[in-house]
């Protein structure tokens, strides 16, 4: 069985190599997790939460080491300081809401002589299959509430960020979690599929591609294992005629190109009212051209390489196809000396003259390219926003709250933003529609996903 290898996008060198877990090690991890969870589920919620907060402190204490390590693994510039701002916000939020979210549900219609309630019981053993693009944030969305809810957790991290799983294990060990309650496993795709297909876990959370989600579903077929899937995205933005132009430009440039566009909820297509269109495109292209593409370990770099060469190749292909069909590219790659074909280093690009016949406006890019289209009104924008097989987030840029809510009710996504984008609010459900996936994380609904209802109907005397 081949080793799991992380190749650094910085220079193409091997950064880490790990042998896949042996079948004996997997069996031991499963047995230890089951044993630990039997006791853990009886521990009070407040005590479970305290362990998770100690885990948070242990992770935060490693931040100085983690930021450059993360840049080496997947290319995000060190100047942005890693992921622990959002990481801490999410962990503290789920801790604060846990007692209320996990409290028994009591029917409103009192019935004398009976005690009736619904208890939220842990599912048992949760498997988290985590991605490389936000390797800490995406994993903790499920890991923290799963543990607080009384579950054991197994983590299988992406090969590109294999060291992240080890950091989770270090922090859990330093937090003093019961032995075996959390385990990081280095697994191949085939091993992961076999583990899911064995029925040995009680819930699978997966963040990744649509094809990866289909593979998870195939593996789970017949086991009745519940799944949480966050898959592809093609997130749109609509800039209405009454939008604050400069504010929209600044935020949407960041929403499109932060993390080299490798964001689940990054902006991939923009529709702008015809009255603002020319000024918006000019400002957007100008601000985009100011990025500095280079080595992510350099503090002056604002745009790092994509995580792998093949991801950059995909974007180059989308740009070439669009330009070949008549689109205009507004950013000169020659102004970005680090941009070289055959490498993960790719200049950001802004395209106009695009339409939905082009891959760049239809298929997930997951990279530093965005297409901009002119629209005449809300109805045209809404039709274009919904013309997608994906549905994670959408943003509306406007001064009119009523209009945003009216449009939001018709937009086919899991989240609708007004005057912001590319953000997860831990108080709201993180979810998608269509091929973006199923289930929800964060918020109290995230706790419901990680527990099962158990009804008690107790007749007195």
Image: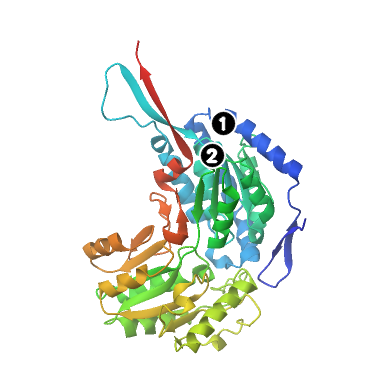
Q: Position of residue 374 (x, y in %)?
A: 33, 81
Q: Tell me the colour scheme of the image.
A: rainbow
- Whether the residues at callouts 1 and 2 have beta carbons within 8 Å, the answer is yes
Q: Residue at x 26, y 24 (%)?
A: 110
Is residue 371 positioned above or below 226 on the image?
Answer: below
Numbered badge on residue 40: 1
- Gap in angstroms between the C-alphas marked 1 and 2: 9 Å
In terms of sequence position, does the residue under pointer 1 or pointer 2 come before the other? 1
Numbered badge on residue 147: 2
Is residue 218 positioned above or below 44 on the image?
Answer: below
Classify the position of the C terminus by image quarter: top left
User: 313 or 288: which is nearer to us?
Assistant: 313
Left/right of residue 175 with respect to residue 349 in the rendered view: right
Q: Residue at x 54, y 43 (%)?
A: 225
Q: Secondary structure at mark 1?
A: helix
Q: Secondary structure at mark 2?
A: helix
Corner quadrant of residue 335: bottom right
Is residue 383 positioned above or below 43 on the image?
Answer: below
Q: Position of residue 229 (x, y in %)?
A: 50, 53
């Amino acid at each position: 069985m081949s080793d799991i290898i992380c190749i650094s996008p910085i220079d193409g060198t091997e950064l880490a190599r790990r042998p896949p877990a042996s079948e004996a090690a997997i069996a031991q991890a499963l047995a230890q997790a089951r044993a630990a969870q039997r006791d853990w589920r009886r521990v009070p919620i407040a005590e479970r939460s305290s362990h998770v907060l100690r885990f948070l402190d242990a992770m935060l204490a490693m931040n100085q080491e983690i930021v450059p390590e993360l840049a080496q693994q997947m290319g995000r510039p060190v100047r942005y300081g890693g992921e622990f701002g959002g990481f801490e916000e999410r962990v503290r939020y789920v801790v604060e809401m846990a007692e209320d979210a996990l409290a028994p549900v009591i029917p409103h219609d009192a019935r004398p002589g009976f005690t009736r309630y619904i208890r939220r019981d842990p599912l048992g053993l949760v498997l988290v299959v985590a991605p490389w693009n936000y390797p800490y944030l995406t994993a903790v969305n499920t890991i923290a509430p799963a543990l607080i809810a009384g579950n054991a957790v197994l983590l299988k991290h992406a090969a590109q960020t294999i060291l992240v799983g080890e950091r989770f294990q270090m922090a859990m060990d330093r937090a003093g979690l019961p032995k075996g309650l959390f385990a990081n496993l280095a697994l191949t795709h085939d091993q992961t599929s076999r583990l899911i297909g064995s029925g040995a876990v009680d819930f699978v959370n997966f963040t990744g591609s649509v094809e990866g989600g289909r593979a998870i579903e195939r593996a789970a077929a017949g086991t009745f294992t519940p799944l949480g899937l966050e898959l592809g995205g093609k997130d749109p933005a609509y800039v209405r005629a009454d939008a604050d132009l400069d504010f929209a430009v600044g935020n949407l440039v960041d929403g499109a190109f932060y993390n080299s566009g490798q964001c689940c909820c990054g902006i991939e297509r923009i529709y702008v009212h015809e009255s603002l269109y020319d000024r918006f495109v000019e400002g957007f292209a100008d601000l985009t051209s100011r990025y500095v593409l280079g080595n992510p370990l350099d503090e002056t770099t604002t745009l790092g390489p994509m995580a792998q060469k093949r991801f950059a190749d995909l974007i180059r292909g989308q740009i070439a196809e669009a330009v070949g069909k008549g689109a205009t590219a507004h950013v000169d790659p020659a102004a970005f000396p680090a941009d070289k074909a055959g490498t993960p280093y790719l200049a950001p690009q802004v395209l106009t003259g695009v339409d939905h016949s082009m891959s760049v406006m239809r298929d997930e890019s997951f990279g530093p390219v965005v297409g901009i289209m002119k629209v005449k009104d809300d109805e045209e924008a809404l039709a274009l926003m919904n013309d997608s097989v994906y549905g994670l987030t959408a943003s509306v840029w406007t001064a009119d709250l009523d209009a945003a809510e009216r449009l939001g009710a018709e937009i086919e996504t899991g989240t609708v933003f007004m005057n912001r984008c590319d953000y997860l609010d831990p108080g709201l459900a993180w979810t998608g529609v269509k091929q973006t996936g199923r289930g929800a994380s964060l918020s109290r609904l995230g706790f419901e996903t990680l527990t099962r209802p158990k009804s008690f109907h107790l007749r007195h005397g």
